Amino acid sequence: MIDPQDITGLILAGGRGSRMGGADKGLQNFNGLPMALHTLMRLQMQVGQVILNANRNLSAYESFGVPVWPDVLSDYAGPLAGFLTGLERCETPYLVTAPCDTPLFPLDLVSRLAQALENAQADIAMASAPETDAQGKISIRTQPVFCLLRADLLESLAAFTQSGGRKIDGWTAQHNTIIVPFNEAADDARAFFNANTLEELQQLETR
């Protein structure tokens, strides 16, 4: 079994927040605390160390007490830019990623991803979870920003992004990737609900 101390947690807080009116999502309050701080507290319990990827309000994020690094790619290049930044700064054999706008993600996220990665001898373990569409239909969908990665994938990701690649699925498809479902009876249906707008954030608080 992979030792949690061999895993670095990466909080992804580098987006534009365009669907939230340009607000910095990680600093928006959820139950009285910034969303990114909820993410940090959940992730710290599951890994050896945590770093944070942000492109603005760096001093606010630094006040959380963990290293903060901006994208190594320019122009808000998306989550893969955060992955790349994390892999460049990762000093452990594994990196696990979590976005700043999903404050209820599972407390056993990392252990389940790690178990699946080890069992399959995979390069990447990606979470999947039930989602309900506009018609009320429930389907299991991948959650690409929740990934456990082998740190030696840095060179591969650097080449992919340098060639213009920006889609997580496009890169993970190049490697042995195991999809890990979080759809057991005991799993919280809200666990992977991400708040993209202030309205969604308020909905999540009141549910």
Image (cartoon, rainbow, N blue to C red):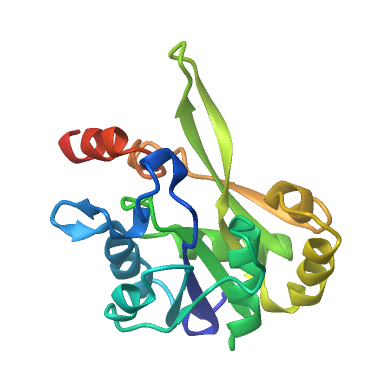
Q: Nearer the viewer, residue 176 or 28?
A: 28
Residue furthest to the bottom in view is 91
Image quadrant where residue 153 sits: bottom right
Residue furthest to the left in view is 32
Q: Nearer the viewer, residue 12 or 21?
A: 21
Q: Tell me if I can see residue 81 in this picture.
A: yes
Percent coordinates x, y for residue 175 in the rendering: 81, 59
Q: Quadrant of the N terminus?
A: bottom right
**Horizontal relation, residue 110 to residue 30: left or right:** right
Residue ID at (64%, 57%): 77
Percent coordinates x, y for residue 199 in the rendering: 27, 33
Residue furthest to the top in view is 135
Q: Quadrant of the C terminus?
A: top left
> Against 137, is 5 above or below?
below
Percent coordinates x, y for residue 69 in the rendering: 50, 78
> Against 89, is 128 above or below?
above
Q: Tell me if I can see residue 193 in this picture.
A: no
Q: Nearer the viewer, residue 77 or 8?
A: 77
**Horizontal relation, residue 23 to residue 76: left or right:** left
Residue ID at (80%, 76%): 155
> Against 200, is 180 above or below?
below
